[in-house]
Amino acid sequence: MHHSYIDHLAHRPGILQSLDPRGKVAATIGYVVAVSLTPNGAVLRLGLLLTLLLGVCIASSVPLAYAAKRGLLVLPFAGPVALAMPLAQPGPIWTTIGPLELSRPGSILAATIITKAFLAATALLVLAATTRFNHLLAALRWYRLPDIFLSILAFLYRYLFIVVDEGQRVARAGRTRSPGRYRRPVTTAAAMIVGLVRRSFDRAQRVYTAMLARGYDGTTRSDHAQPRGAHNLVVSLTFGVIALSFALSPYPVILRWTL
Amino acid sequence: MNEPITDDSPNEQPALLAHELTYRYHGGNRPALDNLHLVVPASRHTAIIGPNGGGKSTLLLHLAGLLPNRSVQILGRPAWTKKNLAWIRRHIGLLFQNPDDQLFMPTVLEDVAFGPLNFDMHDARQVAMETLSDMELGDLADRPPHHLSGGEKHLVALAAVMACRPKILLLDEPTAGLDPGSRRRVIQRLAWLMEQSVTVVAATHDLDMVHELFDRVVLLDQGRCRADGPSAEILANNDLLEASNMEIPLSVLLDRCRKR
């Protein structure tokens, strides 16, 4: 079955791929904080953050179209909030669409929200795409994230593909028995989804039994090799510090330019 | 029905003992196991054969202590108290039929090290790596299980069980879905384990493998033991096999031709 693996760019040569995952996590969090602390309408600053992200993508062989498409996935979540702003924010009218009067501060706020959400989501997706998933988990473990949370992430990642596989198989089986009909009735689609949920539940029980068989007693024991060397960690941590200081320090006047 | 093999040497402690074992799944219209009596001596390797739905996998789950039951004793210990279960699981390895149920860690190496870590084995990671190398799977160590082919998953699942260094190895369809080369590797590995005093019990439809490796066969049908005896006898009994939806394996027929 075909899958688009979340970390499928991790094997390409590039700057991000060669960095220590712990540093990458720190740098990404720094970048996301920098994005989130950017004031409303700070076009130049958002532009600089976008340029930084573009540069990292290019230097890490991440196709820009790929990054942009994945980043846009955040629109269904940020979009509705942003779209309400031009109507909700008081201020001078910027333009009217039919009976709707869009305020200038509200429109600027909407554009800022969408841009910030896009930048933050893209940065996280670029991190995930250029880091092997088990290395990412090791880095998060190094930052002392709770084991149970990491176990859930690992299981989610591992079994997502199996559920998707099963879904594809069920869909294929359905197609072979309905030649020429590609639009499935809602009842059939619902039955397929119910079947998938039931199978997943059964599988969860079998997986748990398999864990018990190999001595699992509710405690996750790990013996993970630490990723990469200290030098590499320092270099990539520096990226995080720079990004954070960019967010927190008093920045030059030119960066204060807003709409 | 053939006389059950209860024990070769009366003084030997049976590795596994099921006495009047009955088990019914929730909602099942008949018992999956019906008043079953089975003794597995440590010195004999037992193949459990039978039609689909005959109760083979359910029996293995009982023998591994995963369906705790008062009718089962494992290595001389009752298999239903919590204290015993932890000890039992340390000494019993179970290979599941579907490797996707068994390989749940992010990488092959972490999965193979899962058991040794839980059993507090010294240098679990090293043990896992050695087991993978022994099975010529060392190059898969860093791969996520979902990147593997079906045959590779099967072999890695077997390695994950073997890394726990069990005294008793229970295998549910160890050769199902493997290409001939991988099947041969599994058979060679099992033969090696049998020489290392590991008691092997396998539920399988691969009767040629049974003929090659196992000295004893138990035929399960509808949760009952229909036959229990030396593999040479049972695998040559056409009437018995046909009554349970099976047939004499080709290797037995070839042996017959050679003898003629």
Image (cartoon, coloured by chain):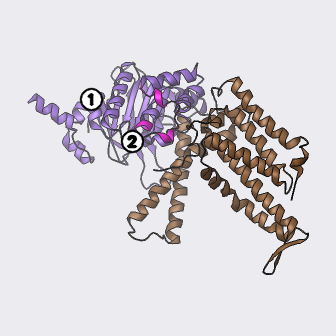
Chain colours: A brown, B purple
The kind of residue on which mark 2 rests is: Lys
Does residue B147 show up magenta in the picture?
yes
Above or below for B48 versus B116: below
Instruction: Please give left or right for residue A167 compared with residue A85 in the image.
Output: left
Please report whichever mark, 2 or 1, sits nearer to the chain's N-terminal start. 2
Does residue B51 show up magenta in the picture?
no
Crowd band around label 1 with a 10 angstrom C-alpha radius: few (<14), some (14–19), many (20+): some
Please provide percent x and percent y for residue B177.
36, 42
Crowd band around label 2 with a 10 angstrom C-alpha radius: few (<14), some (14–19), many (20+): many
Instruction: Determine the image quadrant of residue B209.
Output: top left
Residue found at the far bottom of this picture: A99
Tag 1 residue = B212
The kind of residue on which mark 1 rests is: Glu
Please provide percent x and percent y for residue A93.
87, 73
Q: Which residues are magenta?
A: B135-153
Q: Nearer the viewer, residue B129 or B4?
A: B129
- Identified at 11% across, 33% down, the residue is B257
Camera sees residue B228 = yes
